[in-house]
Structures are given as C-alpha cells and as structure tokens.
Image (spheres, rainbow, N blue to C red):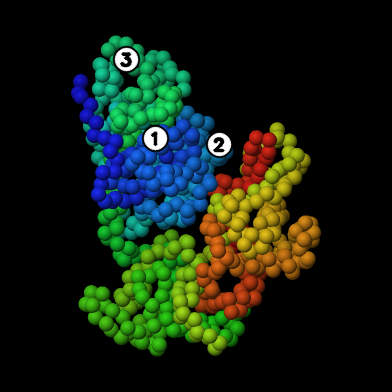
Amino acid sequence: MTKRISENSFNLINHKNINFTFIDLFAGIGGFHQAFSELGGECVFASEIDTNARKTYEHNFKKHSPHLFENGLFNKDIKTIMPEEIPDFDILCAGFPCQPFSQAGKKYGFDDNHKSERGNLFFDIAEIIKAKRPKAFFLENVRGLVKHDNGSTFKTIQHILTEELGYSFYHQIVKASDYGLPQLRPRTFMIGFKGEEILKGFNFPSKIPLKFNMSDVWGGECSREIGFTVRVGGRGSNINDRRNWDAYLVDGKVKKLSFKEAQKIQGFPDDYHFPVCATQAMKQLGNSVAIDAVKAVGSNLISYMNNLNKIGRSMKKTKNRGEWTELFTFIKILLEQKLLLSDKDLKPTGDYFKINKITTENLDLEFIPLSSMKLKSINPIKNEENEIDISEVINKTSISNILSQIKDGSGTFEVEDFEIIQTTLGFSAIKGGNSSQKADIILDIEHSTFVKENEGFGIKSYLGSKPTLLNASGNTNFMFEIENLDNSKISEINKISTKTKLRDRIEEVIKNGGTFTYLKAEKDTMNYNLKMIDSALPEIIGYLLLSFYRSRISKLTDIVDYLCDKTTILTDLDIDDKAMLSDKLKKFLVAILLGFFAGKKWDGSYESNGTIVVKENGDLITFHIIDIDSLKNYLFENIKLDTPSSSRHKFGTVIQDKTKNYFKLNLQLRF
C-alpha cells in the first residue's frame, strides 16, 4: 500500500503575476476554480444557483478570491446576468448541467424545461462566448452527451461553437483514472480556441499512472484499485448489486463511501472544507469535476492558447464573409473617396460625402488621409515610408475579383487578391469584427453644408444572406401571462412539434380558454432601452410578436396594417392613428441600428451616425442622420420579423410558475 501524497495544497494564488483569467459557470463547489487557480489563473466571475453549493464555494474561496464576493461577481442565476456585464476574461469554464443528458436522468436534452430550463443552459454559454469572445473555452458534461438523441444534440453544440461562433472544437471522453485519480468517472471534455487558423493541433495530455489507489483512500486493503464514479448521493446499494456505487470491501468488511473518501477521489485537497451536512457534501462532490483531470487538460489548453497568441492574429488569412465585406468596403472607399447618399429605395439621391480620412476599429492602422490618390505607407519590415498611388494597387478589376470571391465563399475562406493590397498598403489583417460596436468604419467626411471628423458608420451587406438588424438572444425575449388556461392541457400543448409549432401552440392555448396578456421584456435592460425611445414601445412589441407568430405575416409594414385593422392596439395604447404607430416603430428601428444593444443599458445617444449598405452588385450607398427620414423609411419598409430557434433562445412553451402560467416570444429583425 502506497502512501497518498497530496500535491494540491489549498493555497490557491501564490503567484506574483496572474498568467490568465477565467470565469466559472455552473460552478458547483468550484472544481474548475480549484484546478485553474493552481495553474496560475484568476477567477473574475462565477455563477451557481444552488444555495448549499454557493455556501461551500464561498467558504472555500472567499479568502483567496475576495473580489468575487465583495464586488458582486459571484452570480446566482446565469439567466439574470447580461453577458456584457461580465468582466473580460481569457477562458470560459463550464460544467453545464448534465441531468438532461445523463443515464441517471430522463435524458430530455435541450427539451428539458425542469428547474430553469436546465437543458437549454448551453445556449447561455453560447451567448456569453458570442458577447465576450474569450481566447478559449473548457466545457464538461457526461459521456452520454455525445450520443444523446442519436448524436444530434452534440452536433448542435459543435455547430454553434464552430460555425456560428468561429471557434475550433476538440473533444474526448476522459476518465478521472486517466490522470491519476482512483475513480472511473467518464466525462466529455470539450475544448476550443478563438482564431485558430495556423496550428490546429491541440492534443489532450497523455494518460498517467494512478497517484494513489482505493486502498490508500480507505487506509486498508480494498478489493478495488479504482473506485466507482461518485454519484450525487441518494440511497446506497448492496455491494453485490450491479448498480452499486458506494459499497466497498475493505479488509474483508463492507464499507460505505462517505464524503471524506469522495473528496479524495475527486482530487479536492485535504484542507477543503464543507460547511454543510454530510448528505449535501456528498451531493456536491457528485456534481463536481475531477480536479486532476481538469488540471491536466487545462495545462495543455493554457500552453496551446499561449502559442496561438504568440503566432498572432496577423497571420490569419481566412475570414468569414462579414469580415471580408468590411475590408471590401474599406478598399472601395479608398479607391472612390466618396459615398453616395441613398433614398429609402437604395437609389442615389445625387448628394454625396467626400471622404478625407478613413480607418476602421478592426484594422491595425492609423487614420489614412485621402487628400489625393496618393497615400503614405510605412513598410514595417524596412521601416521605410513610401508614397503609393492607390489606383495602382486598387482598381475596378481587383475590386471585381474580390467581390466575386466574397460572394462565392462560405464559412471562413481566403481572398487571394486582398493579399497584394494588404502587403502593399502596409497594414495587418483584420482583427475580427466586434459584435458590441455600431461603427465598423470611421471617416472624416465633407458635405456641401458641413465637415465632420471621426464619424462612425456601420455596415450592412447584401453580398450573402440578408443582414439582420436585431439578432435573437435571451435579451430579446418578451413575456406574456396566460390566464384561464386548463392546466391539464399544458403538457399536451408543449408537446406540439409541427413545422408551425409556435403558431399551433398559441392557437391551442386560445382553443383551451387561455388568453395572452403582455407583461414585459424578459430582461430589465431591454425594457429600459425601449422605454427610452417611447413609453408605449414595450407593449407595442408585444402586440407585434403575438400577431407575427399567430398570423405568420412577417413584413413589418404588413404587420402594422394587420394590427390597425384586426386589434385594439390604437385604443389600448392611446395612439391616434397608424401614422403615429409607424413613427414610434421607425424611431425604434433607427435606435437599434445606430444606438443601443439589447443587452446593454442605453444612454439615449447614437454610437454611429450612419450606415453604409453594400448592395448585391458591390455598389456602396449610405444613410446618415442628416437625412433621417430616408433612413427611417428605408428601415420601416425593408424590415421583417424572423423566427429564431425556440430551443436555443428558450421561448415558445407554456411555463408553469406556482399558480400562474407564462409564455415567451422572441424578437428577431431581418432585412
């Protein structure tokens, strides 16, 4: 029998310098926190909903990470935090709820609506990654996730992380015993990196021998070298039961696993304490991660992430269509040095802006002055300043070639013609679009009536699929109360899975006596932003959504006609006529385009003052607040409501909460 050596003293952050930052989602009792702190990281945000787990987490980490608890960064419910409110971080860690996918559970997966829609909580992770763009993620779940629903659940997760969010994706079934701990505990580990364009070679660490065995754990001769997977607790079983998990034969006697032994085989150090009862401690350990396994894989993740950072974004050659479109817009303005103003039908008005300087927040360059077709460029290798004739580098032929390659491309792809332009002009590649900015291009503009510097313009492109004005998220859900519904019908209503299931569920609610009453935007920030525009706007959106999902009329102007003809919206909201309703919606559309984000509290100002539209033929046309009416009318006449994924954004089912029933609908706006 070997003596157990505890490598993991609970002195977490003894580093003079923090090497990286991470967040700890669905944190439990802090298995990820423990492992990544030992690797030199600082936890800057954590979230855990279970009261007893929160007690244990705070008891053990308050001394070493006081900022979490003193600054309100130990969140309770992940659904109550806006992703934009989370501090910046390098690595997202999340052992998201496994019950919907586990053998022990009923395996509802993404359709599980029990206790805060826990099967849908992966989508909250996706929203945080989308908003914060960390360097890497480390996700953990049960082995059964990979094969759940014939593999479709896992494919959905991988598709969102790779195709929608642009991260690489690696996964492996890892046992705790692979990395030194005497416990089976097979779990799916998922690793991914932002901007991985060159290496694409992350490897999970090689397996290592056991650091100690179950005889060491018990302090006596155990019949098993490697223990069973620690469960969430509950009733134990007979040692001869095939489902036995907590009974061991030690020195010829049957012993039951307690939280003390579970603590050891999960890798928590001896000085980690549980300020809760033994039953709760056992439950918490059963829900946690195996420390040594996370630490071993995490160490490789950190090394690989650091290598990616050293290579640098400047070597990135492939981009998605949106990134290439921004570059296309940039070089086309360089060539033409003017922007034509547009009417509501995307036709030139005859008016234009002369462009005097140009830059973009997503390029590593300073403002480029455009006093003529000549510009000065610094060769970064020779450190020489050269004068370049723009027309020799960018011309109609190169513009046409780049346009064709962008239109033909899919996913992420290269545009060879841009390489020459980039090298000659001496700026590095695009850093990647920022979803939390309204201005993609910054211009000094000159008009017949004014001159403006540092004027921000967004970009909307028709080179691919129609652009969105407002992307769906958890921030764009709106809530209704359902009154007078026969509760015995709720399960049957929620099981409706037709192609038009949202409409059919709404109609079935009404058929069974239910009535919908608008309550509010689910997120207070969205409600606040809408009221900044007009106090009646939240309820107007409620009318729009219910009419859209019931009638399937999608074009905004048509929905307004429908509302004025078929509902009492004008009377209920004290609106004089259709023109007044339309005007309120036009102000809303402009505010979405130029002003606020759904998940960020708005101060009422515009972050950009115009929008450049890239037409299908590559022509650039622009709107600006100097002609706000054309912009309002263009948006109003060209926007439609769209239906996003109901499972991903957690809407479209009847939700029972004590004595009341609720229903959520999601707002997504597309050109």
- Point 43% across, 36% down: residue: 28
Three-letter residue code for mark 1: His
Residue drawn at the location 46% of the way across and 19% of the way down: 235
Q: CA distance from mark 2 to mark 1?
A: 25 Å
Q: Where on the picture, by quarter, is residue 402? A: bottom left
- Residue 552 or residue 362, whichever sits in front: 362
* Residue 172 appears in the rendering: no
Kind of residue sitting beneath label 3? Leu
Give the spatial CA distance, label 1 vs label 3. 34 Å
Q: Earlier in the sequence, mark 1 or mark 3?
A: 1
Q: Please state which amino acid type lies under the numbered disc 2.
A: Lys
| Residue at image point 54% right, 74% down | 610
| Rendered-image quadrant of the N terminus | top left
Residue 59's label in the rendered image is 1
Q: Position of residue 175 (x, y in %)?
A: 33, 33
Q: Tell me the element at label 2.
A: helix
What's the CA distance linking mark 3 and mark 2? Answer: 38 Å
